């Protein structure tokens, strides 16, 4: 079994269980609420909370995930709601959605499987239209219920430096933010999000 096969099976199994209406990530709703809609790409979309939130606000959204289960369900939900969504299955280490985007959103693009994350995020920055933005939100701390208590997450400035972007891009925000999170058993804890916002100048 290849790494891609193993990752696909894992995430298909993860998303197989019935779920309610997916919710958008807090940082997206905070950052993008006032932006004029355009063309967006949701990387690692999962059940599609961010995709649907954007589409309801007038964005035309391409949603990408390695899980065919997640993609199929998201497309069906969007079609039923009449929302402008195109859901595509991608192993982002091998393929990337075509097109130019005014917003690329990558929330918690972490995985225990091999993923060339820097290359993926660099490709995301390159896919921006002039004036477009790349929003990267990462875990910045380990929740008490996390399976990997020894995980370390780079600071937003480290992520930005690793992309080695040229003068066509500018760092608009790079900061650590706290929020209250709820675990699978209903427990709560304060966690840190690392937020990186990159704009394309030209």
Image (cartoon, rainbow, N blue to C red):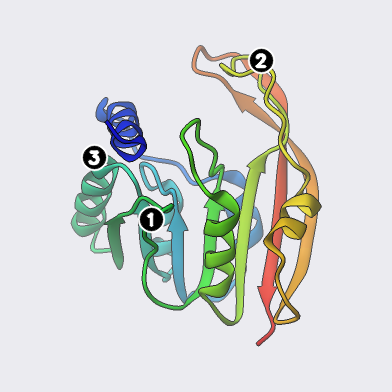
Q: Which mark is residue 54?
A: none
Q: Please report whichever mark, 3 or 1, sits nearer to the chain's N-terminal start.
A: 3
Is residue 79 rendered to the left or right of residue 101? left
Q: Residues within 10 Å of mark 2 (few under 14, many from 20)?
A: some
Q: Nearer the viewer, residue 168 or 146?
A: 168
Q: Which mark is residue 69?
A: 3
Which residue ends up furthest to the bottom in the rendered image?
A: 202
Residue shown at the point (67%, 17%) measured from the top left: 149
Residue at image location 69% in from the left, 19% down from the top = 150
Question: Where does the image place residue 51, in percent across and percent down from the top left?
Answer: 41, 55
Q: Dots 2 and 3: beta carbons under 8 Å?
A: no
Residue at the image point whose x is 19% and y is 51% from the top: 76
Which type of secondary structure does the marked residue at label 1 adopt?
loop
Say which quadrant the N terminus sits in.
top left
Q: Taking 189 as reference, is 139 above or below it?
A: below
Horizontal placement of 160 versus 110: left or right?
A: right
Quarter of the figure with residue 179: top right
Q: Is residue 10 above or below residue 99?
A: above
Name the residue that disc number 1 marks.
Answer: 94
Q: Mark 2 or mark 3: which comes first in sequence?
A: 3
Q: Are marks 2 and 1 in contact (CB under 8 Å)?
A: no
Disc nearest the viewer among 3 and 1: 1
Q: Which residue is mark 2?
A: 144
Q: Tell me the distance, in whole angstroms, between the alpha carbons under discs 2 and 1.
A: 33 Å
Asked if residue 169 is positioned above or below residue 51 in the image, the reply reads below
Q: Nearer the viewer, mark 2 or mark 1?
A: 1
**Res. 10 image quadrant:** top left
Marks 2/3: CA distance?
A: 29 Å
Q: Residue furthest front?
A: 1
In the depicted structure, whether residue 85 falls above or below residue 89: below
């Amino acid at each position: 079994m290849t790494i891609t096969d193993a990752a696909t099976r894992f995430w298909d199994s993860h998303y197989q269980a019935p779920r309610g209406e997916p919710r958008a990530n807090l940082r997206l709703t905070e950052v993008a609420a006032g932006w004029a809609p355009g063309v967006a790409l949701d990387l690692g979309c999962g059940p599609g909370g961010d995709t649907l939130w954007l589409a309801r606000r007038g964005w035309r959204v391409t949603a990408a995930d390695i899980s065919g289960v997640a993609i199929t369900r998201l497309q069906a939900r969007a079609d039923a709601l009449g929302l402008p969504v195109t859901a595509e299955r991608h192993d982002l280490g091998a393929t990337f959605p075509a097109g130019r985007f005014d917003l690329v959103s990558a929330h918690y693009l972490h995985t225990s499987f091999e993923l060339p994350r820097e290359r993926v995020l660099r490709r995301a920055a390159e896919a921006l239209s002039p004036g477009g933005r790349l929003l990267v939100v990462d875990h910045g701390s380990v929740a008490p219920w996390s399976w990997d208590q020894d995980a370390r997450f780079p600071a937003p400035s480290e992520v930005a430096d690793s992309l080695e972007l040229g003068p066509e891009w500018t760092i608009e925000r790079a900061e650590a933010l706290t929020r209250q999170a709820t675990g699978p058993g209903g427990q709560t804890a304060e966690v840190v999000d690392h937020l990186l916002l990159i704009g394309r100048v030209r």
